[in-house]
Image (spheres, rainbow, N blue to C red):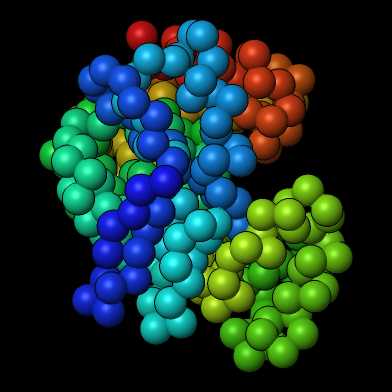
Amino acid sequence: MHSAAVTTEGDRIRWVELPGRAPVRVYVHGLGATSPAYFTATAVHPRLAGHRSLLVDLLGHGHSDRPVSFAYTLEDHADALAAALRTADVTAAEVIAHSMGGSVAVVLAVRHPELVSRLVLVDANLDPLPRVPGTPGSGGIAAYSEEEFLTGGWREVRDRAGAHWWSTMRLAGREALHRSATHLVRGTVPTMRELLLALPVPRAFLYPEADGPFPGAAGLIAAGVSLTAVPDCGHNMMLDNPDAFTEAVAKALA
């Protein structure tokens, strides 16, 4: 376990690091998750093992600190991650990032281009989302005001999330979880999709085959983003079908 102070108050991001050769690979989890739980099997799989790999927990999540004073915008997450990577002497990393982490990775590549040489986005959020009360994802969390979430809404989210997601979501700070979800559904200006289209680095996007054609696929392909449908999985494809997911990541990094 390694760590780096990433705010002026000294709040620390932590990551599990596996030794190996360059290029460095950085794994970034989604909302309410933690990278070691979601990505360790991927990072050590024979198709991907051997590279220096950082399994990073974003601020407010997993093993990292949970400051209440942090705003948890996508830009804030990206800047904090950048500070951690610089402390770790990482440049030109291959970033593999899931869900909200993919949105953060896109912003990281825009704001700190020297840190990212390639992006592999795993069913990442590219567009603003509606706030939908009673749903289990970010839109359901963001449907609460922060006060509502802190005073009891989090329990309703816990019950909707189910035991698996809650096993890592419960590690997140409650302010961090709500603010991260709120800023995720709000998105960026320009949108994460527009930022991704303009990036000059190699980019791949993985999505569950069961979801059908990915919205806006033609525009992504025209901009040079490779799209891969991963079979027999849902949103958490690295857990649902580890072998197919690892094969898709390996091809994207080839």
From the viewer's side, name the closer residue of 167 and 179. 167
| Residue 59 spot, x, y in % from top left | 42, 63
Residue at image coords 39%, 36%: 17
Looking at the image, residue 122 lies above or below residue 161: above
Q: In the image shown, does 247 or 184 lie closer to the viewer?
A: 247
Which residue lies at the image location 44% right of the left edge and 67% below the top edge? 65
Residue drawn at point x = 79 percent, y = 66 percent: 158
Instruction: Please report the residue visible at 83 percent of the width from the left and 62 percent of the height from the top.
Output: 160
Q: Is residue 241 above or below residue 4?
A: above
x then y, percent, for residue 94: 31, 28
Which of the pair 59/225 is nearer the observer?
59
Q: Nearer the viewer, residue 67 or 217?
A: 67
Q: Position of residue 112 (x, y in %)?
A: 18, 48
Residue 153: which quarter of the image? bottom right
Instruction: Give the image location of residue 69, x and y in percent.
Output: 39, 83
Instruction: Locate the C terminus by quadrant.
Output: top left
Quadrant hosting residue 151: bottom right
For residue 236, say whether it is visible. yes
Residue 189 horizontal side relative to residue 151, left or right? left
From this view, report whether residue 5 is shown above or below residue 168.
below
